[in-house]
């Protein structure tokens, strides 16, 4: 602000030095200007009468509009310069000084009011009235942050008002003197021409803007309708043959992306500057960067789509991917996250899952399935009858919690070694989430069963030791 005021004060002495030289020229050319005005009026009236008799009624209206538009600024400038020229130089200088003083006082008043308002906001009473900003129950900004945003906004408003006042007053003050009157017109042109261009460009862009709004609204409501049907399918209220509920959400996302991409392609020609070389160059550059840097991401995205429609698992299933066993807690188009029994979260890219073997333990626990088979192996020597081993293992499995009584547990002999036989107890369960706990209880019951029968579970091992001759 001080710099701009310094420009005001500096321009007035310069104006005083040049005004004395230009005052004589103005007084000498005043009579010539009046004569030229009279001649121009005669020429204008003569040309207007000739044109009126030669053209039609429609062309007459056009000529009147053009003539009035072209001569109004000249007439106003002549009237203003004539009115100012009648005043003495000292009188004009006094008016300019008065305007500068009023301008300084006005700006100081505005800055004082904004400073007082800022102080009121910084007080404790003002801060308590400002509440945090929440967006969907999420605290986006705290009270202090909201206060800082308001202070920055008020500071910008203060600078904007000051700039507007200076921009409008500087050319007005310069117009009082002949030496700076052209400079005032030039300043007004710098200010008004961009505003005029922006306003005309905005008015001319309104039809394209309406088209863009129509396309965006149409896409928005189509996506809204698709989301409604997707929710109905996901909840099981709407059933489509051979379309599973878990397909609803990813299919909706795919259609949403495709619809928005189609909308962008349609409205692209209507965007301002879309036909310029710079806009096209930036678009090509962004496309190249995206294609080069997102090859892995695109691969994961495509793999996510394939996995979704393969249906190897769903949220909540107990699965094994590579050597990790856990529950599926998140499944999207990029990654899959498992939560192990130790509360560990393991993230797998979809591209890795697509090339790996997947074991889903929940598919065996469906209502139309017998259940997941869990098993345990023990070894016993040949001196103990195999029928006894079978009975002990079956009873231990039946005594285990979460093990189904039907189908009944069964025993398989998987190995006949030199000194012992290997027995495998198999039992069914549908509580897949409790598998580690079921194994623990099964091992405990097996140990209790053999101990109650008086059998030692240790198997004999033999080693042949030969002594070397001395």
Image (cartoon, grey):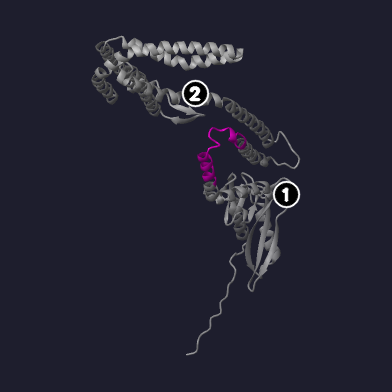
Q: Which residues are magenta?
A: 264-287
Q: For mark 1, what is the residue?
A: 369
> Left or right: where does residue 118 sit relative to residue 438?
left
In magenta segment, residue 278: yes
Percent coordinates x, y for residue 204 in the rendering: 55, 25
Give the residue at the far bottom of this rendering: 470
Asked whether, in this view, residue 74 is left or right of residue 16, the answer is right
Task: Classify mark 1: helix, strand or loop.
Answer: loop
- Mark 2 residue crowding within 10 angstroms, few (<14) / some (14–19) / many (20+): few
The residue where tag 2 is placed is 199
How far, Cα to Cα, is label 2 from label 1?
Answer: 72 Å
User: Left or right of 103: which side holds 432?
Assistant: right
Q: Callout 2: helix, strand or loop?
A: helix
Q: Position of residue 156 (x, y in %)?
A: 37, 25
Q: Residue at x 67, y 33 (%)?
A: 226
Q: Is residue 84 above or below residue 159?
A: above
Taking 255 as reference, is 413 above or below it?
A: below
Query: Can residue 19 be spotted in the picture?
Result: yes
Q: Main secondary structure of the magenta part?
A: helix
Q: Is residue 173 left or right of residue 38?
A: left
The residue positioned 75% from the left and 42% from the top of the image is: 242
N-terminal of the pair, mark 2 or mark 1, is 2
């Amino acid at each position: 602000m001080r710099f701009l005021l310094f420009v005001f004060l500096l321009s007035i002495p310069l104006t005083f030095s040049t005004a004395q030289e230009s005052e004589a020229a103005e007084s000498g050319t005043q009579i010539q200007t009046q004569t030229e005005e009279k001649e121009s009026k005669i020429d204008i009236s003569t040309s207007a009468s000739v044109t009126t008799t030669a053209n039609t009624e429609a062309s007459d209206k056009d000529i009147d509009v053009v003539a009035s538009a072209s001569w109004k600024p000249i007439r106003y400038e002549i009237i203003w310069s004539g009115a100012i020229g009648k005043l003495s130089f000292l009188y004009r200088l006094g008016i300019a000084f008065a305007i500068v003083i009023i301008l300084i006082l006005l700006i100081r008043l505005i800055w004082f009011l904004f400073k007082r308002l800022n102080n009121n906001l910084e007080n404790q009473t003002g801060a308590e009235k400002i509440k945090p900003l929440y967006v969907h129950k999420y605290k986006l900004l705290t009270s202090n942050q909201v206060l800082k945003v308001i202070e920055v906004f008020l500071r910008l408003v203060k600078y904007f008002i000051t700039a507007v006042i200076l921009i409008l007053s500087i050319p007005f003050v310069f117009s009082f003197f002949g030496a700076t009157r052209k400079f005032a017109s030039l300043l007004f042109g710098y200010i008004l021409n961009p505003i005029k261009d922006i306003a005309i460009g905005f008015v001319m862009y309104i039809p394209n803007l309406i088209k863009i709004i129509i396309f965006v609204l149409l896409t928005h409501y189509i996506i809204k309708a698709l989301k409604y049907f997707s929710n109905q399918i996901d909840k099981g209220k709407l059933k489509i043959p051979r379309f599973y509920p878990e397909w609803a959400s990813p299919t909706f996302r795919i259609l949403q992306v495709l619809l928005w991409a189609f909308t962008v392609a349609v409205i692209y020609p209507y965007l301002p500057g879309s036909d310029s070389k710079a806009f096209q160059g930036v678009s090509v550059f962004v496309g190249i960067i995206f294609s080069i840097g997102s090859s892995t991401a695109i691969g994961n995205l495509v793999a996510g789509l394939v996995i979704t429609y393969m249906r190897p698992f769903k949220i909540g299933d107990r699965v094994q991917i590579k050597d990790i066993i856990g529950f599926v807690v998140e499944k999207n188009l990029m990654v899959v996250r498992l939560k192990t029994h130790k509360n560990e979260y393991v993230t797998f890219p979809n591209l890795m899952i697509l090339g790996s073997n997947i074991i889903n333990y929940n598919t065996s626990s469906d209502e139309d399935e017998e259940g997941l088979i869990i098993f345990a192996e023990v070894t016993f020597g040949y001196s103990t009858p195999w029928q006894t081993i079978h009975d002990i293992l079956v009873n231990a499995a039946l005594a285990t919690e979460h093990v189904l009584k039907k189908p009944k547990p069964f025993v398989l002999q998987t190995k006949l070694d030199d000194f012992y036989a290997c027995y495998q107890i198999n039992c069914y369960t549908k509580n897949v989430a409790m598998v580690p706990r079921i194994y623990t209880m099964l091992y405990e019951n097996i140990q209790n069963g053999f101990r109650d029968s008086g059998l030692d579970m240790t198997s004999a091992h033999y080693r042949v030791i030969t002594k070397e001759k001395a």
